[in-house]
Image (cartoon, coloured by chain):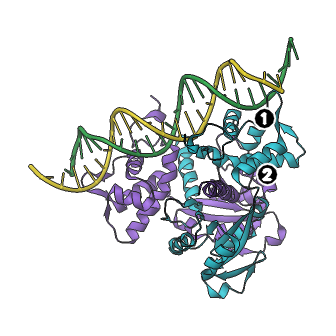
Chain colours: A purple, B cyan, C green, D yellow
Amino acid sequence: MSARTSADPRDPARDIPEATVARLPVYLRALTTLADGGTRTCSSEELATAAGVNSAKLRKDLSYLGSYGTRGVGYDVDYLRYQIAREIGVTQDWPVVIVGIGNLGHALANYSGFRSRGFRVVALLDADPSRHQEVVAGVDVRPFDDLERIVRDHGVAIGVIATPAVAAQDVADRMVANGIRSILNFAPVVLSVPDDVDVRKVDLSIELQILAYHEQRKGATA
Amino acid sequence: MSARTSADPRDPARDIPEATVARLPVYLRALTTLADGGTRTCSSEELATAAGVNSAKLRKDLSYLGSYGTRGVGYDVDYLRYQIAREIGVTQDWPVVIVGIGNLGHALANYSGFRSRGFRVVALLDADPSRHQEVVAGVDVRPFDDLERIVRDHGVAIGVIATPAVAAQDVADRMVANGIRSILNFAPVVLSVPDDVDVRKVDLSIELQILAYHEQRKGATA
DNA sequence: TAGATTGTTAATCGATTAACAATC
DNA sequence: TAGATTGTTAATCGATTAACAATC
C-alpha cells in the first residue's frame, strides 16, 4: 500500500504522468489569459482551445488532479487556476540562480515571465572577473565561487546553466555538490548527474533541426 | 502502395517516429564530439552513453534510417554522422529570419551554434524604428515590413519569433502569408496556424515550472 | 572459428482519443 | 425535466525495452 500508487487524485504523493505535468503550465497560462480577459467560467472545450489541445486530453489531464469542474457548467477559472498552481508548486516562490551571463544569461535575467510565474532570480554568477562589476536586471553579477553561500543563504533549489558548452558539466557538478537537485540546461551538452537530480534541457539548434527535418520532407512531397 | 507506408528505410518518403526525429540531432552532436576527439569508430553502447540514451533505443532509432553499422564492429563515426545529417536535412544550408530583437533576439542572433549546424540568419526584423540603425552579429536590423522581400530574396522557410507575447500571433500570420511553413516560437502564447505549418515552441518559464513540480515532490517525500 | 555487436522482434509500457454514463 | 458538460472507461496508438538471431 505504497503512497506512490494511490488512486486518490488528492493524494499529494501519487504520480501524475509526465506528459500531463508538461501541459499543466500551459493550462495555467491559458487560465490566466482567460481571467485577464474577464472570463469567470469556461468549459473544457474553451480551455482546450485556448491551450491548443483537444478537450478529451484536457479533461483526462485535469482528472489526475481531482474533480474541480461542475458537470453541465464547466470550470471556475480562478478556482481551477489556483488548483493547478498549487499542484505545480508555483503558489510558493522559487529562488533561482543563473550561471553564465552571456547574451542568453542576460536575456534570462531580464525575462519578466520568471518573476510573474513564481520564480525569483536571486543571483547571477559568472567565471569572468571583468563581469563582476555589472548589475543585470537589478541583480549583482557575482563570482562563481559564491555559489555555495548563495545556495545556503537563499535556499536555492533550481539552477540555470547558460554557460558555453565546455563549462557546463563543471557547473552542474558544483551545483549538485551544493545541494541543487533541479537544473535547467541551455548548454548544448549531455550533462551527467546523479539519479535524484532532474535536468531539463533547452537546445535551440536542436529545435531548428527538428523543423528542418519536417521542412525538407514538405519540399519533397509538394 | 502509398510511399508514406513504405517499409524500406532508405525510402525518403517513409515516416520516422517523432520521438526518433527529436533525438537525431542529439546523436549528430554526440558524433561530432566523438569525431573532434579523434574517435573513428564507436559501438552503439558508446554512442548511446555520449547521447544520454540506452543502446537499445539508439539502435532502434538508427534502424529507421537504414543499416549503417557493421555487426561485430560498430559504426564509422564520420559515415554515420553524414547519414544522420542528410536525413535531418542539415547538409544543406537553411536561411532563417528572426523577428523581435530584444534580449532574447540578440542572444539568438549571436548564437554560433546555428551557423555551425546548417542555419544562416539572413535577417533580423523589429517593429521598433529606433532599432533599424543597429547591426547585430553582423546582420542589419530591418523593419518588419521587409519580411516579404527577405523571404522571397533568400528563400526563407524557417522563421523564429522572439517578440513579446502580444505581437507573436500577428508575426506568425505574416510569416504564414509569406510562405513560411516552419516556425520556432519563443513567445509564451499558443499560436494558431494552418495545418501545414509546423510550430515548435520553447517556453522558458514552462520548463522551470516542470522542474518546480518535481522539486516540490522531492521535498515532500524526503 | 570465436567473440563482438548490430538490426529486428515481440512484449511491455505509457499516452491519446472517442464515447458515454454520471450528474449538474 | 431537458440540455449541457464533466469525469471515466476502454480501445487504440505510439514509444520503449530486453532479448537474441544474424552476421561481421
Furthest residue in direction right, as rendered: B38
* Vertical order, B62 against B214 (above or below): above
Q: At 60% from the left edge and 54% from the top edge, which residue is drawn?
A: A221
Element at badge 1?
strand
User: What amino acid is at disc 2?
Assistant: Asp
x and y, in percent, of residue A161 in the image: 71, 58
Label drawn at residue A164: none
* Vertical order, B117 against B134 (above or below): above
x and y, in percent, of residue A119 in the image: 57, 62
**In the picture, residue A43 is in which quadrant?**
bottom left
x and y, in percent, of residue C10 in the image: 57, 22
Q: Is residue B70 visible?
A: yes
Q: At 26% from the left edge and 51% from the top edge, which residue is drawn?
A: A71
x and y, in percent, of residue B158 in the image: 64, 65
User: What amino acid is at disc 1?
Assistant: Gly
Q: How many neighbours does mark 2 have within 10 angstroms: few (below 14), some (14-19), or many (20 or more)?
A: few
Is residue A41 toward the left or the right of residue B155 in the image?
left
Label drawn at residue A170: 2
Q: At 63% from the left edge and 67% from the top edge, which residue is drawn?
A: B160
In the rendered image, which residue does mark 1 sit on?
B69
Q: Quadrant of the N terminus of chain B?
A: top right
Element at badge 2?
helix
Q: CA distance from mark 1 to mark 2?
A: 33 Å
Q: Tag 2, which chain?
A: A
**In the picture, residue A106 is in which quadrant?**
bottom right
Q: Is residue A177 visible?
A: no
Given contact means CB atoms under 8 Å apart, are the residues at marks 1 and 2 in contact? no
Is residue B34 toward the left or the right of residue A181 in the image?
right
Q: How many marks?
A: 2
